[in-house]
């Protein structure tokens, strides 16, 4: 069964922040292969990638996931930045979008509405939720 995953690299996040993209950069993908070797191989010339969250899915391809997310978040164009060298599925995520998503989800569940302190897992849950819509 395929798994959708969200990974992040501290080094790539620092680079993205330095070039003015965002410090919240994540790689989203879907694969049938084991995740550990795939993530340790890395993308964009970085080898410090870490799995943030994964979820089993059926009947979804990586291209479909990237297309869905591209409508909601900005995918970093690998042709514009030589650093990422053709690595697709790397998204810069707005903290405002994630915070709004959490607040609306909590309001619909009838929970208290206070501003959350965002963690990488919150960004990953947001990306997976929007990829599977």
Image (cartoon, rainbow, N blue to C red):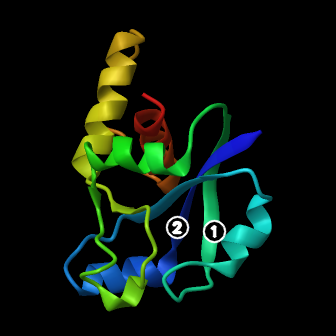
Q: Mark 1 points at which residue?
A: 50
**Element on which disc 2 rests:** strand
Residue at 50% in and 78% down? 10
- Residue 61: image location, x then y, percent: 56, 44
Q: Hey, which quadrant is residue 59 in on the image?
A: top right
Q: Mark 2 points at which residue?
A: 8
Q: Hey, which quadrant is residue 40 in on the image?
A: bottom right
Residue at 36% in and 61% down? 91
Query: How many residues crowd mark 1 within 10 Å: few (<14), some (14–19), many (20+)?
Result: some
Residue at 36% in and 46% down? 67
Residue 34 left/right relative to 88: right
- Residue 33: image location, x then y, percent: 77, 57
* Foreground of the two, 132 or 120: 132
The answer to the question of whether label 1 and label 2 lie on touching residues, with beta carbons closer than 8 A, is yes
Residue 130 lies, with reference to residue 30, above or below; the image says above
* Foreground of the two, 102 or 80: 80
Residue 37 lies, with reference to residue 74, above or below; the image says below
Cα–Cα gap, marks 1 and 2: 6 Å
**Element on which disc 1 rests:** strand
Label ID, residue 66: none
* Quadrant placement of the N terminus: top right
* Foreground of the two, 87 or 104: 87
Residue 18 lies, with reference to residue 75, above or below; the image says below
């Amino acid at each position: 069964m395929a798994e959708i995953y969200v990974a992040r690299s501290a080094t790539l996040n620092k680079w993205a922040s330095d070039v003015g993209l965002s410090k919240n950069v994540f790689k989203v993908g879907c694969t049938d292969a084991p995740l550990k070797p795939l993530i340790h191989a890395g993308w964009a010339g970085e080898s410090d990638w870490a799995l943030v969250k994964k979820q089993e899915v059926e009947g979804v391809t990586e291209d479909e996931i990237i297309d869905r997310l591209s409508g909601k978040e900005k995918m970093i164009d690998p042709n514009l930045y030589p650093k990422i060298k053709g690595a697709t599925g790397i998204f810069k995520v707005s903290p405002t979008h994630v915070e709004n998503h959490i607040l609306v989800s909590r309001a619909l569940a009838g929970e208290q509405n206070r501003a959350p302190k965002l963690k990488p897992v919150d960004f990953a849950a947001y990306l997976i939720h929007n990829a599977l819509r």
